[in-house]
Every structure is written in C-alpha cells, then in structure tokens.
Image (cartoon, helix red, strand yellow):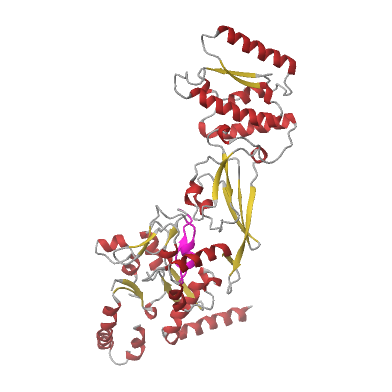
Amino acid sequence: MCSGRIDPLFVLNALESGADGVLVMGCHPGDCHYIAGNYKAERRMKFLKHILGELGIGERVELHWVAASEGPEFQKVITDFTDKITELGPSPLNSKYHFRKPVKEDQKRDQLQDLLVSLADQLGYEGEGPVEIPEEDVMEGYGFPVIDDNKCIGCGACFLNCPEQVILMEDHDGKRSISHFQYNCRTCRRCEEICPQEAVKIKSGFELGAFLSGEAISDLDLAMRECRICGNHFSTGAQLDFIKKRLGENNVEIELKGIDLSDDFFDVCPECRRQIMAERVKNQSNMEAINGTRIMEVKHDEESVSGTQ
Amino acid sequence: MTKKVYLVPNRCIGCEECIEACAKEHGWEERNYVMWMDMVYPVQMHCQHCANAPCALVCPVNAIKISEEGAAVVDEAVCIGCGSCALVCPFGIPRISGMTKKAIKCDQCVDRQKEGREPACVENCCTHALVFGEIEDYESGKRERAAKRMLQAGTYLRDVLMPQEG
C-alpha cells in the first residue's frame, strides 16, 4: 500500500486497539510512483507525532523511508523499532476496543475526534490550549481562524458566510461576542476572502484542548450601540464608525444631514428610522382627517372590552 | 428623470397585497414594509432609490450598483452580508435575508421593467396607492383626475371623495 494512503486514523485506530507501536515505511522522497504520495505521508505522520507527543505516546509511532530493494535496511529498521518498543514496554492503552470501521471522507473528522478523546481519556491527558506545530507540518485542512481585535468591526460577515459554522456571533448584554471552534474548520479561507477589514486570518495549527472538548474559544467582545428611541442594541460602535468613515470618503455626510432625521443619525436603529419616516409620511398626508372615524371605532371597541370585564 | 414607485398615502387601505406580491416575485422574501401608524394608518415603505444612494457608497465590496433604470440593485454574488447598507439607509429598508444571508432590498423589479411591465407591488395594488412613473406625469394629471371623479360621483359625494386624491 502506498504510504500516501496511510491516514492518521489508521494509526490511531491501531494504537487504540492495543498496538504497542506503529511503524510506517515508504519509498524514499522523490521515488514516488504517484509523484507525491510519500510527501503527504511525511506531513501527516509529523502532524500525528506532534499530537501524540502531547498526549505522551509520540515515541510509539515512527516513519521510515525504505525502498523495496533495501533488504538489509528493512531488517535493521524493524529490529531497531521492535527493540525500542520492547524497552518502552506494553502500551498504556487497554486493548478492549476493536478496530473501528473505516468511514467516509466527511465523517473522518468525527472519528478523529472520537479517537483522540478516547486516547486522551485513557492516558489521563488534562492539557488545554493549542499544540504548537510548525506550519509546514500541519496536515492540510486543519486550522482555525484568528480575529484581530483592533481591526474587527463585528459586522458578522464571516459568521454568515462560514460554510461550517466555525465562527459564532452572539449578542448579549449589550455586547457582541465572536468566538470560534477548532473542531470543524476546513481552512476553506472563505472568511479571509470576505472580511471587509481583513481582520480574519486562518492560522494552520491544532488546538488540541478545544478539539477534544468541542467547545468554542472566545475571541473578542465588542461594545454595541443602543438605539436612542427603542433602546435595543442594534450594532457595534465599530461598524457605525466604519460606515461614517466610508461616507466621509465619498462626501455623503451632507446628503444625509439633508434628510434631517435627528442630530445624530447613527443613534437610531433601522427599524426606528423606518418608523420615523412613516410617521412623517402620515403627517404630511391628510390621512388623519379622512380616517379619523376609524380611531373612534377602535376606542369604542376598547371601551366595550373593558366594560364587559 | 427616471421612473420610480410613488406612494399616494390616502389611497392605501393597508391590504398588504404589495408585500405578498413582492414576496412572490422575489423568492418568498418581501422587500417592502407596511408600517401601521397609531395602529390604524397604513404607510407603505419601499426603497426610494436615492440619487446618491448611501447604501451603494458604503458597501465595502461594491455589491450595490445603480442599474440603467436608476434602481439600486444588490448583486447577490458579490454581497458578503455585512449589513452596512441596512445600517446606513435613512429609511431602514435593506435587511439581511434569513435564507440567503445576503442583503435584500427593493430592486424596483428590474427584470419586469425590461419586459415592459410595472413592478409587482404596483401591479397588485388594488387601490392604486402605489404609482409607477415619473413624478411630473403624476402631478400634471392630478387636476384632470379630480375633475373626472367629481363628474362620476355627482355633487353630493364631492366632499367625501375629494381629499382621497393624494
């Protein structure tokens, strides 16, 4: 089997089922029949070794380059590895688990999480936070968004556009908090592309603690502006400042003042603005004079209701 | 002068047929509103297609463009759903769609206009409270219409019917 076919899931599966060590061997770099199979294997195994090292069983997995014609080399590698495993002793993992069934591409992440949670439980791993892995060693498709506090305006475009709901946005207590999951980010970089402030960056890496717990990591809280009329928190101050800046660039400030909504236009939420404008339409037309009778009907109804009570 | 949708407030009876028509035209998400003032006076609110549209100027990705017909139209392929247009609109018309997660606003039915039809809300307004055209045309025809109505109604209904023209 080509070493490029070795999924980290296979190795984790073997370890979980009770293997004391896993040795992966492949053709020398540059000799690959499929051009890049062994480069992929190298990257995946390095990534896996970093994670297993964090869990404490990193030495039990090794990757070696041995070509088909290198008989003595093959023998040496295997003897060395078995000696090393004999020295380390039996695996600290119990072997009551059976090898898990292979899964389809879209369920691999779930299985990876299951396996890592199972290993972490058995090994008593209690660490938190990210595992530092050099960027070239991170397996393709693993990463997490990092949001720049100073640049983010809290518009929520990343939250709306993320196909995997990695970034979350929540409004509570007059604050808009933005958080993210490590678990499901596929590094599609859609958030990077669309961010109007270029505040989101995808960092390749692996936050093991967050991956195991499956909980969101809080990024930042932004203060929200309160509507002068209805009192609802309708947007972040940063986004309103951004809009003001955009308007200033295009010299539109005067145009908006001409509409004469109030002393500060941006203190009013869109719903209240609509209300104000509708009020103005009503006042300018002679609607009240014509439909005055209808108000009396409504009042009459209210009285009759209260009368019956 | 471009054609626009105008509201004649006194003709509106608040049937909200314009909302239904708009929703049917635009994938079951309406882009206009009927505000009930003091719970009894309906005021239909739609995009005014401002000459120097703030929504188009403020959009960080320039997704809102002014079409040939003079309407400010959202290009959904470009829109990122940041909601800046909703926050800047003096009339509070654009909003972020719950389904597509993009900004939705009145496009004055540019597709229908190309076919030579009126916008859906105007076509379906049963009391002709929504008028599509140029403001000069509407104003110049006022006197004629009032005279015609008086003739139809006779003298005793004159006082009642007269103010209904906006």
Identify whether A206 is placed above or below B32: above
Quadrant where the C terminus of chain A sits is: bottom right
x and y percentages locating residue A242 in the rendered image = 52, 63
Q: Is residue B4 magenta-colored?
A: no
Figure label count: 0
Question: Which residue is drawn at the image coordinates 64% and 41% (left, top)?
Answer: A214
**Front-most of residues B128 and A224:** A224
x and y percentages locating residue A79 in the rendered image = 66, 10
Q: Residue furthest bottom?
A: B155
**Residue A303 location, quadrant:** bottom right
**Front-most of residues B145 and B45:** B45
**Residue B165 location, quadrant:** bottom left
Q: Can residue A89 be seen in this view?
A: no
Q: Is residue B85 magenta-colored?
A: yes
- Give the side of residue A259 with respect to residue A76, left or right: left
**Front-most of residues A21 and A254:** A254
Q: Which residue lies furthest to the top in this view?
A: A72
Q: Secondary structure of the magenta portion, mostly?
A: loop
Question: Which residue is drawn at the image coordinates 45% and 56% (left, top)?
Answer: B102
Identify whether A230 is placed above or below A179: below
**Front-most of residues B72 and B46:** B72
Q: Is residue B125 visible?
A: yes
Identify whether B153 is placed above or below A130: below
x and y percentages locating residue B133 in the rendered image = 28, 73
For the record, the magenta segment spans B81-99
x and y percentages locating residue A187 in the rendered image = 52, 41
